[in-house]
Image (spheres, rainbow, N blue to C red):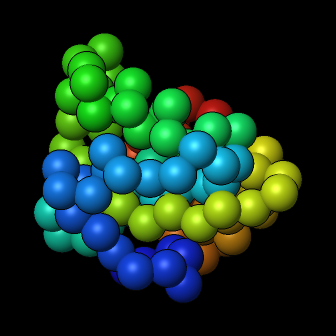
Amino acid sequence: MEILDEKVLVWIVNAQFVKAKPGVYVLYDKNLDAIYIGESENLQNQFAKYFNTNFENDPCKQKTHTYQRTFVENPKERKRQLLEDYKKKHGKMPRCNADID
């Protein structure tokens, strides 16, 4: 189920080309189930870190197959809003956000 209005992109193909802007992103597994909702002041740096390490310290996010991202002025607030909406709709947080439930 897609959370953002943006196009769903294949992680390994597109993640390395994201712009250095603030934004929020949703990581999906191969079934297009949201597994993580995140934010960053610089999506390029965040994605480069993920891409270069293949999520090595985060087994939960290693299931990432596709993603969505959108650039926003206040990523922390937008992430909070997305997580709140997700929890209302599904009764729980995305799998890799479960520690903030």
Position of residue 55 relative to residue 63, above or below, is above
**Among the 4 quarters of the image, the one containing residue 63:** top left
Write the residue at 47% across / 58% down.
Answer: 26
Q: Is residue 53 visible?
A: yes
Quadrant location, the C terminus = top right
Q: Position of residue 27 (x, y in %)?
A: 38, 54
Q: Position of residue 58 (x, y in %)?
A: 32, 23
Q: Position of residue 38 (x, y in %)?
A: 57, 46
Q: Position of residue 5 (x, y in %)?
A: 54, 84
**Among the 4 quarters of the image, the one containing residue 96:** top left
Write the residue at 74% across / 61% down.
Answer: 72
Write the residue at 18% across / 69% down.
Answer: 31
In the displayed structure image, the side of residue 88 where residue 78 appears, left or right: right
In the displayed structure image, the side of residue 47 where residue 77 appears, left or right: right
In the displayed structure image, the side of residue 38 where residue 65 appears, left or right: left
Quadrant location, the N terminus = bottom left
Q: Is residue 80 visible?
A: no
Q: Nearer the viewer, residue 93 or 32?
A: 32
Position of residue 14 relative to residue 53, above or below, is below
State the count of labels.
0
